[in-house]
Image (cartoon, helix red, strand yellow):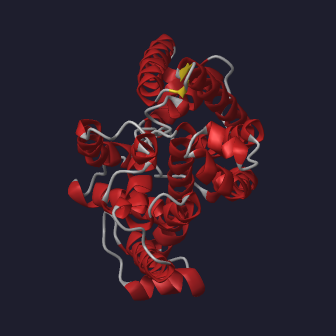
Amino acid sequence: MTDLALRRPVGPGTKAVSGPRRRVIGLVVALAVLLGLLVASMLIGSTTIPPAVVWDALFHPTKDIDQFAIRDFRLPRTIVGLVVGTALGVAGALIQALTRNPLADPGILGVNAGATFAVTVAVGVLGVRDIQSYMWFAFGGALIVTLVVLALGSTRRGQSPVTTVLAGVCVTLVLNGAGQALELTNPDAFDAIRSWNAGSIVSRPLDLLWPALPFFAIAFILVFAVSGSLNAMALGDELAAAQGVRLVRTRILAIIALTLLAGGATAIAGPIGFVGLMVPHVARWFVGPDQRWIFAYSVLLAPILLLTSDILGRVVMRPGEIPVGIVTAFVGAPVLIALVRQKKASGL
């Protein structure tokens, strides 16, 4: 009984699991907030553009310069933020469920660092410049680092949350240092991706997004296919196996989905941290430990966080901007410290 209690998530949702009605209402509210942020992302920038101009730019296009800014910059930026945010949030919820570790996150466990380092090698060593080519490097780097960190975090009793986090942090530091050293050898080759390296959705045309959409679609299908099995695995491998869960199959599918989500998001927007850490916690507070609802909430809450951070980055330093990856780090660092200080933050 004690072991099961320690595996339950920490937060208000653990006291009384929300009923279906409250969960549905929460989804509707989150959807309304997300729609509002999509509109705000179109309106707010270095200059504020009236809603009528935005409407005309989308449905009655002309050669007006404000309409050009909407169609060619803000609209792609908003769509990229929506897709990348969703991918990062679901990836975070997936890796927390897979490792039964509330501190897990594609950034903290080195998944983003693996994808980033692989892209750095592709750009600096092989001269790759287009996303269709270096996306495969991002997928490969994310997969290799995921497998390495999970292997380092394994013990005879199963996956150790603390050891997994430490392994992820160490791998991240090593890869970040190696990537920076590689950049110093050929700084001219990396000038074009300097904004990408900070984690940004600025100047990301939709042509960068289309090649990744099929991979994201496959990943989402896999995630919702294994969500029920992940619920059973939260109680421990032995109980999950007794309920008929195919553990190896579930882990393989989850790792494939995680690789596609984290690798694809990093290839498009660069390394953006803390989104996958915070969003599943907020979702868990509302809906309890049911992974199916956590994934559903993460689909909406993650782009809400990313778009909010992006809008703040535009406003704080007008007419300049702060990359969204830096804003999420400022928001996420205090959250990580608070989670680490909680005594029961070691397991789900």
- Check the picture and name the quadrant holding the N terminus: top left
What residue appears at the point 40 percent right and 76 percent down from the top-left corner? 33
**What residue lies at 48% left-to-right and 51% top-to-bottom?**
201
Q: Is residue 264 above or below residue 123?
A: below
The answer to which quarter of the image holds residue 123 is: top right
Residue 53 position within the rendered picture, expressed as x and y whole percent measured from the top left: 43, 84
Query: Where is residue 318 drawn, in percent x and y?
Result: 24, 57
Is residue 61 in sight in this rendering?
no
Dividing the picture into quadrants, the one containing residue 12 is bottom left
Q: Nearer the viewer, residue 310 or 94?
A: 94
Residue at coordinates 66% horizontally, 57% vertically from top-left? 228
Q: Nearer the viewer, residue 188 or 341?
A: 341
Q: In the visual, does 216 lie left or right of 32?
A: right
Total residue callouts: 0
Whether 299 is drawn above or below 262: the answer is below
In this orientation, which residue lies closer to the viewer: 296 or 250?
250
Q: Position of residue 215 (x, y in %)?
A: 73, 50
- Residue that sits furthest to the front in the current view: 1
Q: Can residue 266 be spotted in the picture?
A: yes
Instruction: Decide: is 120 above or below 248.
Output: above
Which of the 4 quarters of the picture holds residue 48?
bottom left
Residue in the foreground of this view, choosing between 289 and 67: 289
- Vertical relation: 145 (above or below) 185: below
Quarter of the picture containing the C terminus is top left
